[in-house]
Image (tube, rainbow, N blue to C red):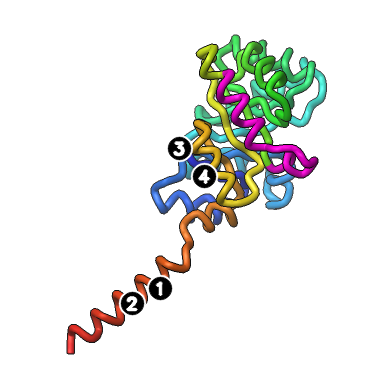
Amino acid sequence: MELYLDTANLTEIREIASWGVLSGVTTNPSLIAKEGRPFEETIREICRVVQGPVSAEVTALEAPAMVEQGRRLAALDEHVVVKLPTTQEGLKACKVLSSEGIPVNMTLIFSANQALLAARAGARYLSPFLGRVDDISWDGTELLREIVEIVQIHDLPVRVIAASIRHPRHVTEAALLGADIATMPYAVFKQLLNHPLTEIGLKRFMEDWEKAKL
């Protein structure tokens, strides 16, 4: 399973990229607005750092405008993936853009049926939102399991992105369920690495080494 950052913060992206484990980035207009930088310039810079898929989301609500925005975004860099909402208009735009060879990430997926529709519209990526499903007292990992199973049974040419990741356990569950990608905030990405027993073990090793040098 590949690991993505869900952010537009270039400092965060550069740090995680330096670990050698970052495969891509997902963004949205809210994340980019928070950085206070020009939208297109930010997307280009993220692509230069990551050198992998970078999802950039349209802001239009009608299919023709989504298609126009999607084409402009795709022209920014070869690594751009156009991110569309899973709505009727989003499906229409996905069909057009995907037929032109532009990769599409269908986002805001909250049901297996939405995922199936997005796949049939030509999406390359499906983004079910685990955390937000949990927020309404359902099981986000169960949604992910259904979508992964449908994709595998019907051999659909899509990649499933476990999105709206809230904690490291979500990442583990996504990997066990067969998600292709997990995208998460910087704080969660850092938590994947940290463990108190690792810190204790390293401290003991160094103490023993200091004694051995005496």
Q: Secondary structure at mark 4?
A: helix
- The amino acid beneath tag 4 is Thr
Q: Quadrant of the C terminus?
A: bottom left
Residue topped by disc 1: 200
If you read the primary sequence from the N terminus, does the residue marked by circle 3 or circle 2 appear first? 3
If you read the primary sequence from the N terminus, does the residue marked by circle 3 or circle 1 appear first? 3
Picture disc at residue 40:
none
Q: Secondary structure at mark 1?
A: helix
Q: Which residues are magenta?
A: 131-150
Residue topped by disc 4: 172
Picture disc at residue 204:
2
Alpha carbons under labels 2 and 1: distance apart: 6 Å
If you read the primary sequence from the N terminus, does the residue marked by circle 4 or circle 2 appear first? 4
Say which residue appears at 61% left-offset and 50% top-offset.
Answer: 185
Q: Residues within 10 Å of mark 1 (few under 14, many from 20)?
A: few
**Image location of residue 64, percent across then percent down:** 77, 15
- The amino acid beneath tag 2 is Arg
Rendered view: 23 above or below 198: above
Say which residue appears at 75% left-offset and 37% top-offset.
Answer: 138
Q: Is residue 55 left or right of residue 88?
A: left
Residue 137 sits inside the magenta stretch:
yes
The dominant secondary structure in magenta is helix
- The amino acid beneath tag 3 is Gln
User: Which callout, 3 or 4, points to the residue nearer the camera?
Assistant: 4
The answer to whether mark 2 and mark 1 are in CB contact below 8 A is: yes
Quarter of the figure with residue 210: bottom left
Residue topped by disc 3: 51
Rendered view: 212 above or below 141: below
Q: Secondary structure at mark 2?
A: helix
197 or 91, which lies in front?
197
The answer to whether mark 4 and mark 2 are in CB contact below 8 A is: no
